[in-house]
Amino acid sequence: MLQNKRILLIISGGIAAYKCLELIRRLREQGAAVRCVLTKSATEFVTPLSVAALSGDKVYGDLFSLTDEHEMGHIHLSRDADLLIVVPATANILARMAQGIADDLATTVLLATDKKVMAAPSMNVRMWEHDSTVSNLENLRRRGIEILGPDSGDMACGEFGEGRMVEPAEILAAIQAHFKDDGRLSGLRALVTSGPTHEPIDPVRYIANRSSGKQGHAIASALARLGADTTLITGPTREHDPSKVEVVHVETAREMLAACENALPTDIAVCAAAVSDWRVTQEADQKIKKDGSEPSLSLTENPDILRTLSQPGNDRPRLVVGFAAETGDVIEKAVPKRKTKGCDWIVANDVSPGTGTFGGDANQVHLITETGSESWPQMSKQEVADMLVRRIADHLHPPAAAE
Ligand code: C5P
């Protein structure tokens, strides 16, 4: 059932747009609230009136309409949804999504959202196989957009091949699968560290690292989506605060540790931050001036937050997960780290130059637990987060026991 789930359905202008009507009906039968945005060309295939009648809501379409923006701006449309799905997704809207073009309400909402996005492509086989579409799809998948289908078969244009939109029943099944874990972590508390730390040298300079915070933020979002009461403790990043997460912004490792201790007790701790190993022993209170000499910095080791949280005691979270960013023999280096840190699991990844892990959208990780290590395929950071959090839920509430 999709009781109380809010689906934002974006309908673009393809021949398969009529199938949306059945999808809306089925979603509502399952208890979902469906709000629809139509592109201008979608209105050539389905009428706003039939979409409004079936969804039981006003239909949105015009970015520059005073009423639409007044009643429900593009930011609110995404904020008030649990999932965005583009059905059908034409080659054109996929290209605009891939390039971040926001020239109508539909694409502006898609650019403004931090929610999960799915898309069901629908187009002629030659358009589907065109290099542009292939690279746009690659780009969208890497960013975590879930692509449903397409199927092969006879097409409205008289050709045969891949590009036919998957049936509404299959789209409904994918939406149900997306929500199936929801609530599995409700009643539990989680803390996540993310991003780099900044260790001041003087009032204007600091030591930092290349961490973007994308992986840690995605994990916090995924934990919250499964119902955990989640606190994200983050160093300075360009990431937005995830919704439904309490976010504490810090700069230094010592501030991060204090914020973590403040968030305890929790059931789950995931330390994804790239904490600076050292801080400057004596921060200068004035900007250090050039005077022709070669200045040197004396460094002091920072507290190890993961090790501290892993220490046995009443406040120890039931599951502590660390990360190991390594170069070279990633698994061999990460396995002993689980023991030295005292944590339960380690997520190890290769951050060698050229992997694009630092700052990029994709990640290839190995999960190291007490029973051994397993390598996951290359995925978007959002997919890594979803899979890790599902594993956390299985560990804390084994599926059989959850029945
Ligand atoms: O020792 P290393 O930095 O390789 O360990 C990485 C793991 O330890 C990550 O989970 C990171 O968040 C955590 N860590 C920490 N505090 C530190 C250094 C690392 O929590 N001072």
Image: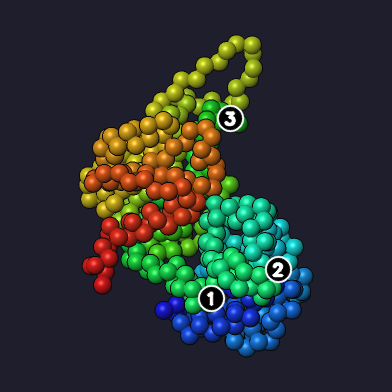
**Residue topped by disc 3:** 205
Q: Residue at x 67, y 80 (%)?
A: 59
| Crowding at mark 3 (Cα within 10 Å: few <14, some 14-19, many 20+) | some
- Number of labelled discs? 3
Where disc 2 sits, the SS reads: helix
- Residue 144: x percent and y percent? 53, 56
State which tag comes first along the sequence, 2 or 1.
Answer: 2
Q: Amino acid at mark 2?
A: Leu
CA separation in Å, label 3 and label 1 = 56 Å
Can residue 108 be seen from the camera position used here? no
Q: Amino acid at mark 1?
A: Glu
Where disc 1 sits, the SS reads: loop
| Crowding at mark 1 (Cα within 10 Å: few <14, some 14-19, many 20+) | some
**Residue topped by disc 2:** 105
Q: Residue at x 38, y 67 (%)?
A: 181
> Where is 324 relative to 174, above or below?
above
Q: Nearer the viewer, residue 44 or 232?
A: 44
- Image check: 205 left or right of 63? left
Q: Amino acid at mark 3?
A: Arg
Asked if the beta carbon under badge 2 is closer than 8 A to the nearest atom of ligand 1, the reply is no
Q: Residue at x 65, y 67 (%)?
A: 123
> Where is 226 relative to 258, above or below?
below
State which tag comes first along the sequence, 2 or 3.
Answer: 2
> Where is 111 relative to 339, above or below?
below
**Residue topped by disc 1:** 167
> Where is 265 relative to 120, above or below?
above
| Crowding at mark 2 (Cα within 10 Å: few <14, some 14-19, many 20+) | many
**Disc 3 vs disc 1: Cβ atoms closer than 8 Å?**
no
